[in-house]
Image (cartoon, rainbow, N blue to C red):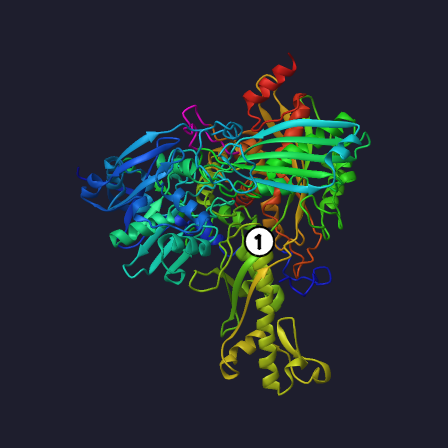
């Protein structure tokens, strides 16, 4: 349902929303008291470790665990044989990714696990497990995997959208768009055709996956883990283990980063199975190498673009064919890449075709606006090249083609009020745009889009006897959401922010909640929080009416108190929340508000990024000199954390553009599974990241909120590439733009 | 093999423990002493989430053996606040929203404190280079650097 209360953000005179209070979990996090996934322990706990495939692709002919089981201190060993069949195909893939079946599909694929009284003994036990592998031919490159004679991972799993005769690694074809591409291209003064490539990158959260599981012979189980969605963990583990969801209580730890990578399970079903077999609690913590080898990186991509433009900058047609490999199982985000590629533009003729391809790499997981950054890299690079080729201002060209309210989006829907044009105008007026550049320096801009999401949400707001408020919600807080929920509850109730404490409830305490993903939490949980607060207010008005002996319709809620209204106005002193709470027991019992919804109306989000770079022509090294983010937040609940999302996304995009890549050898083995060789941006790589928050209210949220978490990673790949291309004097079409690649491009351009 | 007996000082408190020869100091802190404020992000000295001080020198606890702490003065995040009074860096990190998920925060605070002890008036560039060994994936470092420079200014004015 969409809420009937349309956005009243502009007419509301906010008291709490838009301020910058201190986050409630701040002190725990600066003192080391906050408990993350690996920080929990239990009496009698065992240590669980995973044995992983050293092969990129191999048939598992046999596994002998007898010597490991016989080792003193080992209490359980599990392999795939310990798990039953799972009916649902997607969940069966998740199980297969957690514990390989008859084939190991990538370097690092889990093949067995042990639980022992110490990590030292568990390591010894792993060495005692004997596996007879039959190595198979492998493929890790997306274009190579699409060749008809490529090594096949799964035969016969392509869906009905895939034409006959293609490689068995092609799992699905997606198509979006409208109009007539060829007719549109015929109207252009220039048609640009380019192929762009991006490498796989990892979400790179600093906290490795960790969990602590216990499970009794009666099937009752408890699980503590770092996840973006403990309800998803519960449901997935219950399905894999064949137990009822209600028997498994999952508690989310503090989460040390996720960015989409913690929206699935890896260790959790294995830890539960080890706990079940051993009859002891089992703790499992991944090493960094395990995180990089076996958890979700994003897809790598290969994208062909054809765009036609008139010499005054109008795009006459846009076409893109996108090929994404998503690792060893179907489900790369090429569908979302295909939908988002041209989403910022108002085009008569637009079409995208996406191919979902499997390779011998770890199963991809969502990474912040999954699928969109690579697509935007291709399209925004092409538009930039065309604009500059005509001597046009790249911001003007984007403004000329920008999607607006009423534009039919390339992926189907018609946009309501959106903020793209506002970000472009703000960018054009910003001093950054007109600042001088020096030698070997270049400036790039790019736009980005993300859908945003709502989904199942359930919150409970309780008024305590002393008149404070506890809010229980079911979404792990990955970037300050407890603060924004407390703010929205306080705003609605008319009480100070510090009178509301928000907690992340376990799966036994609330109904289903979607994963913290899709930039959904501030929107959807916020919306549910506001409605729960409204329900509590209605109840408090009713209690006051009862005390006053008047109709409850004749009571309004203002400034944190019930007040008689209409004919009774002024007859009674306002009764504050605390006063109503104090007598709740005598007026009908405890007071609470709750709200359950499958939230719709998330409101799409747009951003424009601007970046200055300097290229060292002798080494190819790129320095980021200046960076400014312009993004529509709908309404910024806590501006500091909105800025933080803008900045964090931009810097992840900078890493993707310049440094980060999965490097596979000829042997199909990941060459750089560590933070030394998989290099994410560090403080000395960067300048300050300036931000400009625009607020074009989302009509689907009572306060106008839009999700802000993901859009910020969409433009930077292209923005940086456009800046580097200008600085280096050569168009860069492959990421990352690491120094050797930039140097090679410069040398090739200079002959 | 029998365990090694170590006598050391952690955050000013005399401390004794038994450890295996191969236990890192981070293993000892987290798994034997229950001091989980220091985080393990990589185990190879690349991320800085386990930053501690040993006799005043900034080190990664994952790169040092537990046995090597014998007779040393160890400082961890748990010793940074004094009673209920936060260190200025801790306060500024909260005020500047310099943390999102918070997993890197203990290590960055320990490293930043170590910087300000050596250089009470760092430039932005000096702060960025000093903290280059501490990875943060959430913030893009902007608010972290601002918090460090603001804390440095407050601390200079207070001294």
Label 1: how many Cα within 10 Å (few below 14, some 14–19, many 20+): many
- Look at 65% across and 13% down and name the residue there: A750
Q: Position of residue A697 (x, y in %)?
A: 70, 55
Say which element carries label 1: loop
Residue A242 in the image, given as x and y percentages of width and height: 36, 56
* Residue at the extreme right of the image, as rendered: A312
Vertically, is B89 above or below A701?
above
In this view of the protein, which residue sits in the foreground, A472 or A730?
A730
Query: Which of these two is toward me, A441 or A338?
Result: A338
Q: The magenta stretch spans which residues?
A: A664-681
Q: Is residue A677 magenta?
A: yes
- Image position, residue A42 (x, y; %): 30, 54
| Residue B10 occupies quadrant | top left
Quadrant (top left/top right/bottom left/bottom right) for the C terminus of chain A: top right
**Residue B56, visible in the rendered structure:** no
The residue at which mark 1 appears reads as A520
Residue A112 visible somewhere in the drawing: yes
Q: Choose between A68 and A303: the one closer to the eye.
A: A303
Query: Is residue A739 in the magenta section?
Result: no
Closer to us: A371 or A568: A371
Q: Is residue A2 above or below residue B41?
A: below
> Which residue is pictured at 74% across the width and 35% down the height?
A317
Quarter assignment of residue A206: top left
Residue A154 % position (x, y): 44, 37
Please give left or right for residue A293 compared with residue B14 in the image.
Answer: right
Dominant SS in magenta: loop
Q: Residue furthest top?
A: A751
């Amino acid at each position: 349902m969409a809420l009937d209360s349309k956005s009243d953000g502009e007419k509301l005179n906010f008291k709490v929303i838009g301020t910058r209070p201190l986050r409630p979990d701040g002190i725990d996090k600066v003192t080391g008291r906050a408990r993350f996934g690996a920080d929990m322990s239990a009496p009698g706990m065992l240590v669980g470790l995973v044995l992983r495939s050293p092969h990129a692709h191999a048939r598992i002919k046999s596994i002998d665990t007898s010597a490991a089981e016989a080792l003193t201190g080992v209490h359980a060993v599990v392999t795939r044989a310990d798990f039953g069949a799972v009916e649902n195909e997607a969940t069966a893939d998740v199980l297969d990714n957690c514990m390989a079946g008859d084939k190991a599909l990538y370097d690092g694929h889990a093949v067995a696990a042990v639980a022992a009284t110490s990590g030292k003994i568990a390591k010894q036990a792993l060495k005692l497990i004997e596996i007879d592998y039959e190595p198979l031919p492998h493929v890790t490159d997306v274009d190579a995997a699409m060749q008809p004679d490529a090594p096949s991972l799964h035969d016969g799993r392509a869906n009905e959208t895939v034409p006959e005769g293609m490689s068995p690694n092609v799992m699905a074809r997606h198509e979006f768009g409208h109009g007539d591409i060829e007719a549109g291209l015929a109207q252009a003064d220039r048609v640009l055709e380019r192929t762009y490539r991006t490498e796989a990158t990892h979400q790179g959260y600093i906290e490795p996956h960790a969990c602590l599981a216990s499970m009794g012979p009666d099937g009752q189980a408890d699980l503590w883990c770092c996840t973006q969605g403990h309800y998803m963990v519960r449901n997935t583990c219950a399905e894999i283990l064949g137990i009822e969801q209600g028997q498994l209580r999952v508690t989310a730890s503090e989460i040390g980063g996720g960015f989409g990578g913690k929206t699935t399970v890896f260790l959790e079903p294995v830890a539960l199975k080890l706990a079940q077999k051993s009859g002891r609690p089992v703790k499992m913590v991944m090493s960094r190498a395990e995180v990089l080898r076996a958890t979700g990186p994003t897809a790598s991509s290969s994208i062909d673009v054809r765009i036609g433009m008139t010499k005054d900058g109008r795009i006459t047609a846009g076409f893109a064919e996108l090929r994404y490999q998503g690792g060893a199982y179907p489900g790369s985000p090429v569908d979302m890449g295909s939908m988002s590629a041209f989403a910022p533009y108002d085009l008569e003729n637009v079409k995208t075709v996406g191919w979902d391809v499997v390779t011998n790499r770890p199963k991809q997981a969502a990474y912040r606006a999954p699928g969109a950054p690579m697509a935007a890299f291709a399209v925004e690079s092409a538009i930039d090249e065309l604009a500059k080729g005509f001597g046009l201002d790249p911001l003007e060209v984007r403004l000329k083609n920008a999607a607006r309210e009423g534009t039919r989006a390339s992926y189907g829907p018609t946009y309501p009020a959106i903020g793209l044009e506002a970000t472009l105008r703000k960018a054009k007026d910003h001093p950054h745009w007109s600042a001088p550049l020096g030698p070997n320096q270049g400036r790039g801009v790019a736009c980005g889009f993300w859908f945003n999401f709502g989904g199942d949400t359930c919150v409970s707001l309780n008024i305590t006897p002393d008149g404070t408020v506890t809010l229980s919600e079911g979404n792990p807080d990955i970037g300050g959401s407890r603060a924004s929920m407390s703010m929205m509850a306080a705003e609605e109730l008319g009480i100070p922010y510090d009178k509301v404490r928000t907690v992340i409830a376990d799966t036994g305490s609330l109904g289903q909640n979607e994963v913290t993903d899709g930039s959904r939490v501030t929107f959807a949980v916020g919306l549910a929080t506001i409605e729960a607060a409204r329900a509590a207010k209605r109840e408090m008005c009713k209690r006051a009416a009862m005390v006053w002996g008047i109709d409850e319709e004749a009571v309004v809620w203002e400034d944190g108190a019930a007040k008689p209204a209409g004919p009774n106005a002024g007859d009674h002193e306002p009764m504050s929340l605390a006063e109503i709470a104090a007598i709740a027991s005598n007026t009908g019992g405890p007071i609470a508000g709750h709200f359950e919804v499958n939230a719709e109306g998330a409101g799409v989000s747009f951003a424009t990024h601007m970046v200055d770079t300097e290229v060292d022509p002798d080494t190819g090294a790129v320095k980021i000199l200046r960076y400014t983010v312009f993004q529509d937040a709908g309404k910024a609940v806590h501006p500091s954390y909105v800025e933080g999302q803008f900045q964090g996304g931009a810097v992840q995009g900078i890493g993707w553009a310049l440094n980060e890549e999965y490097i596979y050898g000829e042997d199909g083995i990941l060459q750089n599974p560590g933070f030394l060789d998989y290099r994410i941006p560090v403080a000395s790589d960067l300048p300050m990241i300036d931000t400009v928050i625009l607020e074009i209210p989302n009509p689907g949220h009572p306060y106008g909120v839009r999700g802000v978490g993901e859009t910020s990673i969409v433009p930077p790949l292209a923005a940086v590439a456009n800046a580097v291309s200008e600085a280096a004097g050569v168009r860069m079409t492959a990421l990352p733009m690491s120094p050797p690649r930039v140097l090679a491009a410069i040398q090739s351009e200079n002959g | 093999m029998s365990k090694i007996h170590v006598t050391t000082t952690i955050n000013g408190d005399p401390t004794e423990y038994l450890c295996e020869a191969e236990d890192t100091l981070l293993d000892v802190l987290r798994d034997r002493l229950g001091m989980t404020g220091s985080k393990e992000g990589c185990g190879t000295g690349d991320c800085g989430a386990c930053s501690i001080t040993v006799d005043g020198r900034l080190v990664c606890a994952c790169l040092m053996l537990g046995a090597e702490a014998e007779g040393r003065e160890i400082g961890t995040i748990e010793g940074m606040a004094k009673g209920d009074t936060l260190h200025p860096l801790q306060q500024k990190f909260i005020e500047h929203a310099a943390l999102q998920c918070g997993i890197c925060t203990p290590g960055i605070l320990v490293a930043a404190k170590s910087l300000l002890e050596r250089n009470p008036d760092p430039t932005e560039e000096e702060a960025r280079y000093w903290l280059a060994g501490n990875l943060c994936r959430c913030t893009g470092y902007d608010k972290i650097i601002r918090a460090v420079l603001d804390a440095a200014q407050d601390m200079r004015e207070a001294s």
